[in-house]
Amino acid sequence: MMEQKLSFVTLGVKDLKRAADFYEHQFGWKRSAMSDENILFFELKGTQLALYNREALAEDATVDAKGEGFAGITFSYLAGSETEVDELIAGFRERGVTIVKEPQKVFWGGYSSYLSDPDGYLWEIAFNPFV
């Protein structure tokens, strides 16, 4: 059996420079020393987020790179309060980030909003009062 952990999440991106700019300037994240001109890594407290050319990633996985529409995956950032969600989304909006869903109370008892990165990957910015 495998150990229960997630080591890397690799996003196939159309334009590595544009994707790097988004994560570095919109989220304020810093790339790790493992990064080079072909792949970028961001250390996320126990997990690594990697950005890699979409075509090359599909080739590596031996699949077609022409996926369209919802990818069936979202990422979540848990804020400390509803107010923090509102403040973060307001800041993203001011910097031109696409807000997909405005902050609102949600069916599971939390408070949530969604934004999109340049490649259409969805990030939920949420407050979960149960964790």
Image (cartoon, rainbow, N blue to C red):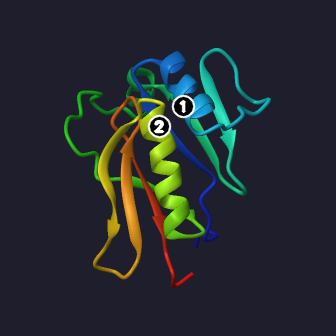
Quarter holding residue 107: bottom left
Is 10 or 62 nearer to us in this picture?
A: 10
> What kind of element bears circle 2?
strand
Direction from residue 7 to residue 85 in the image, left or right: left
Say whether disc 2 or disc 1 marks the residue closer to the N-terminus. Answer: 2
Which residue occupies 50% across, 26% down?
19
- Mark 2 closeness class: few <14, some 14–19, many ≥20 residues within 10 Å: some
Q: How many numbered marks does the figure carry?
A: 2
Quarter holding residue 2: bottom right
Is 105 or 50 nearer to us in this picture?
A: 105
Q: Amino acid at mark 2?
A: Leu
Direction from residue 6 to residue 97 in the image, left or right: left
Which residue occupies 80% across, 29% down?
33
Q: Position of residue 68 (x, y in %)?
A: 20, 35
Measure the alpha-carbon separation of dots 2 and 1: 5 Å
- Outermost residue toward the right in this view: 33
> What kind of element bears circle 1?
strand
The answer to whether residue 77 is seen in the rendering is no
Classify 16 as above or below 57.
above
- Mark 1 closeness class: few <14, some 14–19, many ≥20 residues within 10 Å: many
Classify 37 as above or below 25.
above
Quarter holding residue 66: top left
Which residue occupies 55% across, 70% down?
81
The answer to whether marks 2 and 1 mark residues whose Cβ atoms lie closer than 8 Å is yes
The answer to whether residue 6 is seen in the rendering is yes
Is 36 or 44 nearer to us in this picture?
A: 44
- Can you tell which mark lies on residue 11? 2
Q: Position of residue 74 (x, y in %)?
A: 38, 53
- Can you tell which mark lies on residue 51? 1
